[in-house]
Image (cartoon, grey):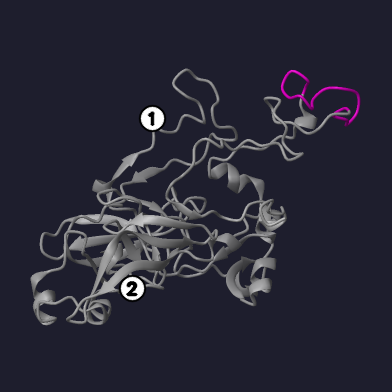
Amino acid sequence: MLQPRIRPLLNQPSPFAQTTVAASKKAAEEDVSVTLRTYKPRTPGLRHLKRPINDHLWRGRPYRPLTFPKKGQARGGRNNSGRITVRHRGGGAKRRIRTVDFDRKDPGAHLVDRIEYDPNRTAHIALLTNRATGRKSYIIAADGMRAGDVVHSYRAGLPKDLLEDMGGIIDPGILAARTAHRGNCLPMHLIPVGTMIYCIASRKDGPAKFCRSAGTYGVIESKEEETRDDGTKMVTGKFVMVRLQSGEIRKVDKDAVATIGIASNVHYSYTSLGKAGRNRWLGIRPTVRGLAMNSVDHPHGGGRGKSKGNRIPVSPWGKPAKSGYKTRRTNNINRHVVTPRVRNMGRRKDRKAS
């Protein structure tokens, strides 16, 4: 029997499901309408339930050799001594961890067998089969990727037949037309400027670190190039500039890899769970206000009536939660950040500008 709390939507919608166009505040600001699946309110929990329509997902179980049970990892937010280190964690449906390939070191053509739902992440995953060896692997699926597509990984280098077709000289235009396709994995210096990428690695031999969640992507901002006498362009700099969705611009090693496209399940942010119980199925426990606790549990707790006393809001450990209290370390500067993201939603004035 299927468990709807951890299973994707069935290919055939139920007779109680109806497709509507729900525009949230974010979509209204961007003048974009998102098509979601809503349900007739047979129960209170279905009244506000909204889900993206993903009828292309695989309806069966995952490829078992690439999974393992989630047992030792699910400690309910506790560490090895039993103390709570992460609050609001615990419970949830049984899961199996999918082993996702973030390195893409296996070269050659890979056939996309199917697109699957993964309960451990927001993006969907794709099951690949290497055409040469038959080896299977999971990757983060790109938006628009479907079963039957063919993707390549050029992390180990360009194949000889591709170089021979270009006459032995790497022409950026021809190379982009042949390799810069959705789902292909390429080194940063081979990706054209302005291309949207996801699953971005930070160093040469490292796995993907950035833009792995649903609907995330980065954009190649610039590369340090020089034009040779024969007309070809060569990347001379050590880094490539990548702009993330937060507005941050980072320096990434030119030999680090990224995948062309946008991470799948782009409409995930418009999902409405409809009831508190679905959060419990996902392993998320309630968030209790400090005001509602006893004085032994929180600085805001205790007292007669709903009053935290005449004090500024603080965390459960006594640190100020508002009032401009600085918690960021100033002596740990990230040298790879060229332009930091805008903090405080741009409301805080820049002291240097003033």
Q: From the viewer's perspective, is residue 136 above or below residue 21?
A: above
Local SS, label 1? loop
Name the residue at 25% across, 49% down.
205
Q: Quadrant of residue 271?
A: bottom right
* Front one among 68 and 17: 68
Q: Is residue 292 magenta?
A: no
* Front one among 354 and 177: 354
Name the residue at 65% across, 38% down.
286
| Amino acid type, residue under disc 2 in the picture | Pro
Residue 215, how many percent across, how many down? Answer: 48, 63
Name the residue at 63% across, 58% down.
272
Residue 159: give its label: none
Disc 2 and disc 1 in contact, CB within 8 angstroms: no
Predominant SS of the magenta segment: loop
Please state the extent of the stretch shown in magenta in the rendering.
294-309
- Tell which circle, 2 or 1, labels the residue nearer the N-terminal end: 1
Q: Would residue 22 be visible to someone looking at this image?
A: no
Local SS, label 2? loop
| Amino acid type, residue under disc 1 in the picture | Gly
* Position of residue 305 in the picture relative to residue 223 (left or right): right
Name the residue at 73% across, 24% down.
298
Give the farthest residue toward the right: 304
Residue 316, how many percent across, how many down? Answer: 69, 27
Task: Identify residue for label 1.
Answer: 72
* Front one among 10 and 256: 256
Task: Identify residue for label 2.
Answer: 192
Q: In which quarter of the image is residue 169?
A: bottom left
Q: Would residue 6 be visible to someone looking at this image?
A: yes
